[in-house]
Amino acid sequence: MPGHLMQNYSRLSLALSHGQGAWVWDIEGRRYLDALAGIAVNTVGHAHPRLVAALRDQVGKLIHCSNVYQIPLQEQLADRLCEVAGADAAFFCNSGLEANEAALKLARLWGHARGAALPRIVVFDGAFHGRSLATLSATGNPKVHKGFEPLVEGFVRVPLNDAAAIERAAQQHPDLCAVFIEAIQGEGGIRPAHPEYLRLLRQICDRNGWLLMIDEVQCGMGRTGRWLAHHWADVRPDVVAMAKGLASGVPIGAVLGYGEAARLFQPGQHGSTFGGNPLACRAALETLAIVEDEGLLENASRVGGWLLEQLRERLGGLAGVVDVRGSGLMIGIELDRACAELVAQAQQAGLLINVTQERVIRLLPPLILRQEEAEQLLALLVPLVQRFVGVA
């Protein structure tokens, strides 16, 4: 029973009790293979002993202090993130939405500094950047907009991977100041920005004096087999937004700045009460260390690559399956019909998945997923999809 909770979630009839590695148990003791990881949040799985020990230690020292003071753990995390991302500076907040809000504010600052009266930002069909008024306005999904009009102005929407549309936008909107793109659209159905397209955007941004801003909230933090998904394109952005898997479940978001964009914010222009507090930063530092020490980038690439190959082999040619796509441990199976009912069917079979864009089965397991667990995932999911499309 929902009790006094607001009714903004359509929850499954499932209450989880605890987890271990890639597995979780409900309050009745039933076990499930977690192929969702809190929607790409539980990077190192559940109850990782190193993360548990680090959090216990930090809780006994200092959970929170204000950004009025210096926070050494925050400085250490900024150094480490900038090292793995090739960035110059970091700002910390609490979520992907907040990271994206900060990125949009940086774009506004950039545009105003260059004389734009109404700085405009290129965004993309199918994108999802959050549910605040600014980020839902940047999001390319009318369902997210409905009921919250008027939307925040200043966004120019174009199709993903369409070079001609970007060129037209540049000609039609002299006040454009930035491009804001997900390296892989997660909520949009696991749709990647092609590497050559990201490289083209870099060229267009350089030519026009725009910022290239990349939303890595869902696809970053090693999920594709590299620290950030745009690293596959060998592109240097100006701004990157991160969150979700950065601290393996402890809320944190980050905005990384490169070059001039790293120096845009001045004292008083942006901030966060909880952002970058000692507990969140300790969790993120330990997560980064575990990913590196345990070779989880390589694991995501190897196990995810095998899983994607097997799904394509077993499902790709079936009538009713439109596409099987992804990178590392970020995989989407697009069907030709709505398939939300598969979520409950998978739950009954002992597997946690979800569906986005009504027709895309989304798999986002923790990066510690072992080969034998990937085989179990395959054995549970493939028959469900086959029966659903009517070939089994």
Image (tube, rainbow, N blue to C red):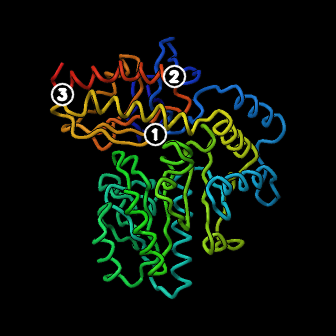
**Placement of the N terminus among the 4 image quadrants:** top left
Q: Left or right: where does residue 71 sit relative to residue 353? A: right
Q: Earlier in the sequence, mark 3 or mark 1?
A: 1
Q: Are marks 3 and 2 in contact (CB under 8 Å)?
A: no
Q: Secondary structure at mark 3?
A: loop
Q: Position of residue 235 (x, y in %)?
A: 50, 62
| Residue type, mark 3 in image | Val
- Count of numbered marks: 3
Circle 2 or circle 1, nearest the eye: 1
Mark identifier at residue 328:
1
Q: Nearer the viewer, mark 3 or mark 1?
A: 1
Looking at marks 2 and 1 on the same chain, the residue that comes earlier in the sequence is marked by 2
336 above or below 52?
below
Marks 3/2: CA–CA distance? 30 Å
Residue 87 x/y as whole percent: 64, 62
In screen coordinates, is 57 left or right of 310? right
The circle on residue 16 is: 2
N-terminal of the pair, mark 3 or mark 2, is: 2
Circle 1 SS class? loop
Three-letter amino acid code of the residue under disc 1 = Gly
